[in-house]
Image (cartoon, rainbow, N blue to C red):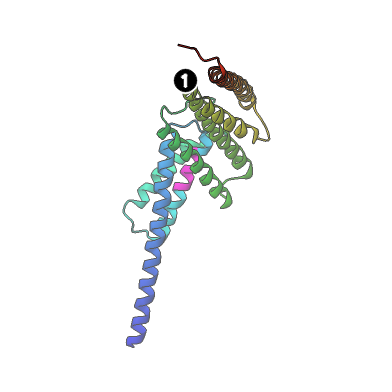
Amino acid sequence: MAIIVNAVQQHRNKVEAEKRVEVAKQKNVIDETEEILLAAEHIPVSQQLKFILQQRILNALKIIGQVNPGVMDIRSRIANSTGKLKTLAENKESTFPDTFTLPSNDKQVVQYIKCVKKMRGLVRSEYTKGRVDSSAFMHEDKYLERLQLRANVETLMRRADTSMQAQQLGSARQCIEKAITALDSQSQPDDYIIQRKLELEGQLKKIQDNLRSANTEDVLKRKESERNELDELFSEKKKW
């Protein structure tokens, strides 16, 4: 009898442990998604993307409710999330904002790019789970990819400008070449890519001309210095 009781208790403990693990997993999903949604207020994204993220939160809350209905406030949180999802559903069409403002410093830019990458990962995850249709996934992923590209290119251009102001032409050239390479990697160039590439190629040519001019000047100065040394070496010594 004691053996049976112990086996039953062990099974209950195992079930409870599995429930705790699942609840903790879903709470992490909720925290992660809420953080991205908060950041999305400062990044130009579509209402459809916000809908996808809010739906991810609701799914996680429902799983918690099924696994452990006794979790505090789970019913009210599900109701609240459902209300937010309903509001977003009324304006869910995949229209993308036409505004872009790069953060003011490099640390913020890094966070911006990381957030966009995270969004792409979450959308892909929801698509893999069958919660996002193919059309919506393709539109959102392509837009986020271009947003990430734009942040990278604009950051490199900003660094190139700073280097040029400091007369660090070599560093400026490297930044511009990296930006051009990033733009060239896109198989379907849009107006932004075409315009920026033309602008960057013009800047690169200017820098290369300046570098060639500087190198020529250095060569001439070096030759002049060598000639002066030779003249002094072979010149007729003065008699005193």
**Crowding near pointer 1: few (<14 within 10 Å), some, many (20+)?**
few
Q: Amino acid at mark 1?
A: Gln
In the foreground, 237 or 23: 237
In the foreground, 185 or 225: 225
In the foreground, 121 or 231: 231
Asked whether residue 167 is drawn in magenta, I would say no
Quarter placement of the N terminus: bottom left
Decide: is 168 above or below 65.
above
Quarter placement of the C terminus: top left
Question: Residue 21's x, y, as percent?
Answer: 39, 62
In the foreground, 31 or 86: 31
Decide: is 114 above or below 159.
below
In the image, taking residue 21 as reference, residue 184 lies left or right, namely: right
Can residue 96 be seen from the camera position used here?
no
Main SS, magenta region, reads helix
Can residue 117 be seen from the camera position used here?
yes
In the image, taking residue 208 as reference, residue 111 lies left or right, namely: left
Question: Residue 102's x, y, as percent?
Answer: 47, 27
Asked whether residue 52 is drawn in magenta, I would say yes
Q: Please identify the residue farthest to the front as the structure is shown.
A: 240
The residue that appears at 38% across and 60% down in the rendered structure is 68
- The answer to which image quadrant residue 26 occupies is bottom left
Q: Please identify the residue farthest to the bottom as the structure is shown.
A: 1
In the rendered structure, which segment of residues is drawn in magenta? 50-57
Q: Please identify the residue farthest to the right as the structure is shown.
A: 187
Which residue is label 1 attached to?
A: 165
Question: Residue 161's x, y, as percent?
Answer: 49, 22
- The answer to which image quadrant residue 20 occupies is bottom left
